[in-house]
Amino acid sequence: MSDMTVIDIGGTIAAHRGWFKFLGAALAVAGVLAIAFPLAGGLAVEVWVAIACAVAGIGQCVHAFGARAWSDVLFGLVIGVLYLATAALLAINPMKGVVTLTVLLAVLMLAEGIIQVVLAARIRPNGGWGYLAASGALGVALGAMIWAQLPSSALWVLGLFLGINLITSGFAFWVLADAAQPMAADGRSANGQRSI
């Protein structure tokens, strides 16, 4: 990685410190709420996904019938029916839906953790990279734990582990924003030191 890339990333973070702090605070608040109500949080997520699938399915089917002249109308209709079937299955048996979503959460947390570790390696010379790497490592560990405890932990794990992950991600972005220093036009930070 060139020195210019490091400066660009650090400068971008410094220029948008407020947005990084906003993201950090929003993630932390969402995490606290998810931990406070783990079962309710898990069921709420499941119901929300069912509603989203129903809306998407209706939209796809309406589009398929409305755009009959389109050569791929059958594909749109099939996708719409699949969305509606998913919504129906989630609505009929919410607990199976929670288990399924718990599996998806495990995969998401593993992927997010890996991406955060890679991002931390990319910004490593900048302050705060270690916190981002630690957040990524924790995401990978939590994703693996979710996977190992299935299906018995699905009742509480969605809310609890999602909350922990959101809090650590929020903390990492807040620290990243605090570590970034605004750069002057001559490449000097606010404390007068020249950046690499």
Image (cartoon, rainbow, N blue to C red):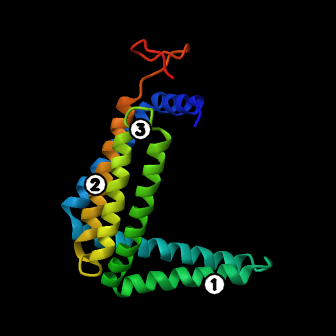
Q: Are marks 1 and 3 in contact (CB under 8 Å)?
A: no
The secondary structure type at the circle numbered 1 is helix
Disc 3 or 2, which lies upstream in sequence?
3
Nearer mark to the viewer, of 1 and 3: 3
- The residue indicated by pointer 2 is 31
Disc 3 designates what residue? 20
Q: Of marks 1 and 3, which one's residue comes earlier in the chain? A: 3
- Whether label 3 touches label 2, CB < 8 Å: no
Residue 9 x/y as whole percent: 52, 34
Residue sitting at the far front = 1
Choose top left, top right, bottom left or bottom right for residue 50. bottom left
Residue marked by disc 1: 78
Q: Secondary structure at mark 3?
A: helix
Of the two numbered discs 1 and 2 in the rendering, the one whose residue sits closer to the viewer: 2
State the residue at coordinates (48%, 46%): 119
Q: Residues within 10 Å of mark 3 (few under 14, many from 20)?
A: many
